[in-house]
Image: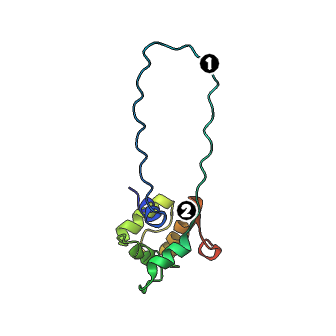
Amino acid sequence: MSIFSTIKDKIFGHKPEAAPPPAAAAPAAPVATPAAAPVPAAPVAISEVDVEARLASLAEGHELNWRTSIVDLMKLLGIDSSLENRKELAHELGYTGALDGSAEMNIWLHKATMQELAKNGGKVPADMLD
């Protein structure tokens, strides 16, 4: 699982895997039915997750600057915030700068992570996106 997927799952929560439908018994004799046009699947609504509220709730009692620090955000979520993991996250999100753990890299990672959360159905405050 990717680092971003882990972050997203920790904030949005896991959705249980749908159980496969039970196998239908084959009919005893073929039944003639008129051909029907395929019915397109209805779009599935993505429920918006309030990322800030969820993280603020998790942060109660912790002294972490998760609002601006990717390291503190990862720590809050119980994810290893090592440079190796941040480099992997940088690759996932398309960072093209030096993978040296600099402030520039970490600031970019935090903003890119928040932008991806917003793209995936998260409600993220504007000040965390730019």
Q: Is residue 57 above or below residue 97?
A: below
Instruction: Name the residue located 42 percent from the left edge and 87 percent from the top edge.
Output: 63
- Front residue of 7/21: it is 21
Query: Element at badge 2?
Result: helix
Instruction: Name the residue located 58 percent from the left edge and 16 percent from the top edge.
Output: 33
Q: Nearer the viewer, mark 2 or mark 1?
A: 1
How many neighbours does mark 1 have within 10 angstroms: few (below 14), some (14-19), or many (20 or more)?
few
Q: In which quarter of the image is residue 73?
A: bottom left
Q: Quadrant of the N terminus?
A: bottom left
Q: In which quarter of the image is the C terminus?
A: bottom right
Q: Is residue 17 above or below residue 36?
A: below
Question: Is there any visible trace of residue 117 in the rendered image?
Answer: yes
Instruction: Say which label, 2 or 1, has the lower sequence index.
Output: 1
How many neighbours does mark 2 have within 10 angstroms: few (below 14), some (14-19), or many (20 or more)?
some
Query: Element at badge 1?
Result: loop
- Residue marked by disc 2: 116
Whole-percent x, y for residue 72 in the image: 43, 78
Q: In this view, does 104 lie above or below 11?
A: below
Whole-percent x, y for residue 59 in the image: 45, 80
Whole-percent x, y for residue 101 in the image: 42, 74
Q: Mark on residue 47?
A: none
Whole-percent x, y for residue 126 in the image: 65, 73
- Front residue of 58/119: it is 58
Residues at circles 2 and 1 in contact by the CB criterion of under 8 Å: no
Q: Is residue 23 above or below residue 114?
A: above
Q: Mark on residue 35?
A: 1
- Front residue of 67/94: it is 67
Q: What residue type is labelled 2?
A: Glu
Q: What residue type is labelled 1?
A: Ala
